[in-house]
Image: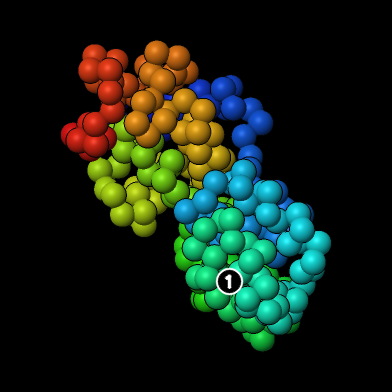
Amino acid sequence: MTARERAAQLIEAFREVYPGAHCELNFKNPLELLVATILSAQCTDKRVNMVTPKLFAKYRTAAAYANSDPATFEKEIQSTGFFRNKTKSIRAAASAVVAKHRGKVPDTMEQLNALPGVGRKTANVVLGNAFGKAEGVVVDTHVARLSQRLRLTKHNDPEKIEADLMKIVPREHWTMWSHWLIWHGRRRCFARKPDCSQCEVLRLCPSGKIYMRTGEARPADATS
């Protein structure tokens, strides 16, 4: 089975297994999603969702974030980790949104990627989920891990993994593809002990057969 054929079968399987898959960061508009996505770096969506309600209630515009007091903002997001860098990124991105985009979060890859602290992954999250635009595939740790285990890529670099996925996953599924793999990674295909015995797509996973025999996941299995 080729990678393209495997991806096609996985799409059909994941549609049934996770019909309600969606972005698990809570947001009501592009600005909120941009902020939440920056906060989610090296942090769980659950923790971010605990922090953002008060944040979103206090800072309702890009200008509000841009003009926020750094020390105060750091305390407000401290529990998400790396709060100093995240504070700088959010304030800088918001300042650019105000200065270059009249306070509205832009809706193109080029413009989003040009914002301070916003990389391709964050831009893909915002474009796909806030604007409904499929410009690429979000590659987080779950997507990277599962793409390797499913033999859809041999790369470790997120941009190379994304390039591989964009070749074999139809564009109309790019946004959902990330949701499906993230949901599966959080609920079944864990990093250290994947639950292969209960896996709904085991028949499509070359690595699963190895894990079932050895009883453990090994990094080498992902790309062999």
Q: Whole-percent x and y of residue 189?
A: 42, 28
Q: Is residue 157 left or right of residue 169?
A: left
Q: Is residue 2 left or right of residue 140?
A: left
The image quarter in which residue 152 lies: top left
Q: Is residue 87 above or below residue 128?
A: below
The image quarter in which residue 179 lies: top right
Image quadrant where one finds the N terminus: top left
Q: Is residue 42 above or below residue 176?
A: below
Q: Whole-percent x and y of residue 43?
A: 52, 51
Q: Whole-percent x and y of residue 118?
A: 52, 68
> As shown in the figure, which amino acid type bears the numbered disc 1?
Thr
Residue identifier under label 1: 87
SS at badge 1: helix
Asked whether residue 172 appears in the rendered view, the answer is no
> Nearest the camera: 151 or 12?
151
Query: For the point 43% across and 41% down, which residue is it?
Result: 142
Asked whether residue 85 appears in the rendered view, the answer is yes
Query: For the point 79% across and 66% down, which residue is it?
Result: 58
Q: Is residue 92 left or right of residue 11?
A: right
Q: Is residue 129 left or right of residue 14?
A: right
Query: For the point 47% across and 53% down, which residue is it?
Result: 42
Query: For the point 31% across and 38% down, which residue is it?
Result: 148
Q: Whole-percent x and y of residue 2?
A: 30, 31
Q: Is residue 50 above or below residue 214?
A: below
